[in-house]
Amino acid sequence: MCWPMGRIIEIYSSKDDHLTRSVLVKTAKGQYKRPIHKLVLLPSQ
């Protein structure tokens, strides 16, 4: 299975405790708003 790779272009924080809760991810096919617990960090080279 091949997962789409993307770049985080915007961060959304909660108003209560100012923690990052979701992000806007830009991929080759569009932009998606995703919760941070569904993201996987890949090491950069």
Image: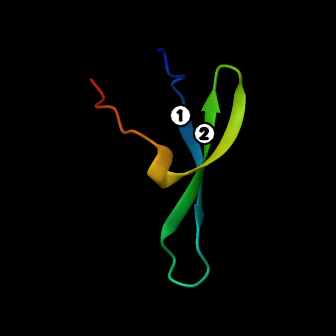
Residue 18, relative to residue 36: is it above or below? Answer: below
Front residue of 19/37: it is 37
**Residue drawn where x is 47% and y is 14% of the image:** 1
Residue under label 2 = 25
User: Disc 1 vs disc 2: Cβ atoms closer than 8 Å?
Assistant: yes
**Residue drawn where x is 40% and y is 39% of the image:** 40
Q: Which element is circle 1 on?
A: strand
Residue 20, relative to residue 27: is it above or below? Answer: below
Front residue of 25/34: it is 34
Residue under label 1 = 7
Q: How is the image coloured?
A: rainbow
Q: CA distance from mark 1 to mark 2?
A: 5 Å
**Residue drawn where x is 54% and y is 29% of the image:** 6
Q: Is 34 on the left-hand or right-hand side of 44? A: right
Front residue of 32/44: it is 32
Instruction: Write down the quadrant of residue 14 in the picture.
Output: bottom right
Q: Position of residue 3 (x, y in %)?
A: 50, 22
Tag 1: amino acid? Arg
